[in-house]
């Protein structure tokens, strides 16, 4: 079966039954205890959400439906199934979306079917194109992307059906699915239009119907080299989801829990992704590295790097690309990109400097006792990879991340409606409450 909607329509009743069983069997069990420090400290380590798509292990990193990043690189369909060489090994995002939605590794035919469906759904109407082309070019790409999704919201099938009173709760997932699939199909085109508007005199490039979702995105931005298309395939696959609690996934889920449609929900999620402690870090890493190169060049000593870290921290800033709220080891998504760059970009001076930094900086950060994890995260490498391949406009990088993250956020949103999850509404406490509760 290559029709994703039919496949998940069969899985949904089984999963609903599983959720019901978990609620009945374990509903009154205690998940854990948490402290005042956790309540005030960004809820670190508190399990407070259910997301069935991926989980983040502090040491193994992200695990998508039971599969690690290296396993997915091996098992997921590739753009050219006949090419077995290392130059054609990046997974197709179509494949990872199928896996996230169904829990099953897709066949090449299933990934192809999604490719065609997204091509078909991905047409962006002229009125939306005009809306983007009329935005001031000095808006940040993420602001433009978020606004463009809000513009597309007028086409939401869920919002229309709900407004007409034509939909019952048990069927919410279907129009959510339709909106989510439309959003995913359109977002690379919208993001490419933003890129061409901001950086290429608004000269747009038509979609190429032969290409896959990621390859077409590279094409519509203006990159025809095979290596860039491969890089974007891998990039869009590995950034797609990072369990439910990260800022973009959590925001999308929270807003969606109020039955805001997928456009409203993901636009909100994108605004969180645009923050420097989250998705904007990839742009920040590049800015950081370019400043460093301007001062010191690309051939630097380890001591130069260490001094630079001290300088950044003593001026009250963070070293972007290092650390994580959950991970306690190097992010496997960083390793994935190292493998790619060592094969495709082995002579690039900036990549070499980045690898030297990734060796030196964690040891230096370890000397600052307060930092729980000094190791490179996904954003440490991704911007530099894009820069070395010719996508040098680093203020755009978080938009590429956003195209990818649409896969995880939309898959989660569809499943949230299929599970019938309620509006999210945790309690909060004022300072007096803590005094009263814990007064000796
Ligand atoms: N450079 C300098 N200081 C750092 C640091 C870094 N890379 N990582 C953590 N710290 C500091 C924190 O700012 C915090 O300091 P204060 O107590 O003075 O506020 C202290 O170390 C403890 O932080 P932590 O428990 O180790 O980490 P958090 O869970 O609070 O924060 C993160 C996690 C990602 C926000 C943080 O490591 C950071 O700011 N890293 C740099 C930005 C970055 O790369 N973000 C991308 C993360 C991946 C993503 O979400 O996309």
Image (cartoon, helix red, strand yellow):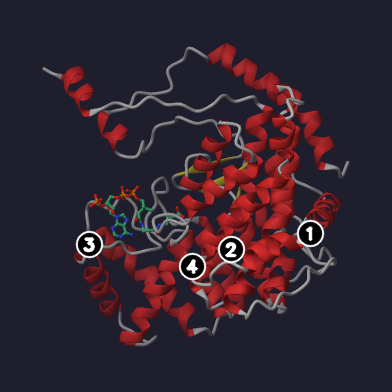
Q: Compute the Cα span from label 3 to label 1.
A: 46 Å
Q: Which x, y percent locates residue 224?
A: 72, 78
Label 3 belongs to which residue?
316
For the residue with label 2, is its CB less than 8 Å from the closest atom of ligand 1? no
In the picture, measured across the screen, residue 100 lies left or right of residue 293, that is: right
Closer to the camera in the image, 220 or 298: 220
Q: Compute the Cα span from label 3 to label 2.
A: 28 Å
Is the Cβ of the residue at disc 4 closer than 8 Å to that at disc 1? no
Q: Return the disc, 4 or 1, that comes first in the chain's sequence.
A: 1
Label 1 belongs to which residue?
123
Label 4 belongs to which residue?
381
Q: Compute the Cα span from label 1 to label 2.
A: 19 Å
Task: State the SS at label 2.
Answer: helix
Q: Compute the Cα span from label 4 to label 2.
A: 14 Å
In the picture, measured across the screen, residue 307 lies left or right of residue 247, that is: left
- What residue appears at the point 51 percent right and 47 percent down from the top-left corner? 248
- What residue appears at the point 71 percent right and 79 percent down from the top-left corner? 225
Residue pushed farthest right?
A: 1
Tell me, yes or no, if residue 67 can be seen here: no
For label 4, count other residues whose C-alpha is less than 10 Å away and answer few (under 14), some (14-19) or many (20+).
many
- What residue appears at the point 62 percent right and 32 percent down from the top-left corner? 416
Q: Classify 24 as above or below 69.
A: above
Rendered image quadrant of residue 157: top right
**Which circle, 1 or 2, is nearer the viewer?**
1
Q: Which x, y percent locates residue 90?
A: 68, 64
Q: Which mark is residue 400?
A: 2
In the picture, measured across the screen, residue 49 lies left or right of residue 164, that is: left
Q: Compute the Cα span from label 3 to label 4.
A: 23 Å
In the picture, measured across the screen, residue 171 lies left or right of residue 73, that is: right
């Amino acid at each position: 079966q290559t029709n994703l909607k039919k496949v998940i329509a069969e899985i949904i009743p089984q999963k609903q039954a599983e959720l019901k069983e978990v609620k009945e069997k374990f509903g009154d069990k205690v998940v854990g205890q948490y402290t005042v420090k956790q309540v005030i400290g960004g809820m670190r380590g508190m399990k407070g959400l259910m997301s069935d798509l991926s989980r983040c292990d502090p040491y193994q990193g992200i695990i998508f439906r039971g599969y690690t990043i290296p396993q997915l690189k091996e098992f997921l369909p590739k753009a050219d199934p006949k090419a077995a060489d290392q130059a054609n090994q990046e997974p197709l995002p179509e494949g990872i979306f199928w896996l996230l939605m169904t829990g099953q590794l897709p066949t090449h035919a299933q990934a192809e079917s999604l490719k065609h469906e997204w091509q078909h759904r991905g047409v962006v109407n002229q009125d939306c194109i005009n809306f983007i082309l009329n935005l001031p070019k000095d808006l940040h790409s993420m602001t433009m992307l978020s606004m463009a999704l809000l513009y597309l919201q007028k086409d939401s099938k869920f919002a229309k059906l709900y407004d007409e009173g034509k939909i019952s709760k048990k069927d919410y997932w279907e129009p959510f699915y339709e909106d989510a699939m439309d959003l995913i199909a359109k977002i690379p085109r919208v993001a490419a239009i933003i890129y061409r508007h901001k950086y290429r005199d608004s000269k747009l490039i038509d979609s190429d119907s032969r290409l896959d979702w990621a390859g077409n995105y590279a094409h519509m931005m203006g990159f025809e080299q095979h290596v860039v298309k491969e890089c974007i395939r891998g990039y869009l696959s590995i950034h797609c989801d990072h369990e439910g609690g990260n800022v973009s996934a959590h925001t999308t889920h929270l807003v969606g829990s109020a039955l805001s449609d997928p456009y409203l929900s993901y636009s909100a999620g994108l605004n969180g992704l645009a923050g420097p402690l989250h998705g904007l870090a990839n742009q920040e890493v590049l800015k950081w590295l370019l400043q460093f190169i301007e001062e010191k060049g690309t051939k630097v000593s380890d001591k130069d790097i260490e001094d630079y870290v001290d300088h950044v921290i003593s001026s009250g800033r963070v070293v972007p690309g290092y650390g994580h709220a959950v991970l306690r080891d190097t992010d496997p998504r960083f390793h994935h990109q190292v493998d790619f760059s060592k094969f495709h970009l082995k002579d690039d001076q900036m990549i070499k400097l980045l690898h030297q930094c990734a060796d030196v900086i964690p040891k230096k950060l370890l000397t600052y006792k307060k930092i729980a994890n000094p190791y490179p995260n996904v954003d440490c490498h991704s911007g530099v990879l894009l820069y070395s391949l010719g996508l040098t406009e680093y203020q755009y990088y978080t938009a590429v991340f956003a195209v990818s993250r649409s896969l995880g956020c939309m898959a989660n949103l569809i499943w949230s409606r299929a599970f019938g999850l309620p509006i999210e509404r945790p309690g909060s406490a004022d300072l007096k409450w803590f005094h009263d509760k814990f007064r000796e």
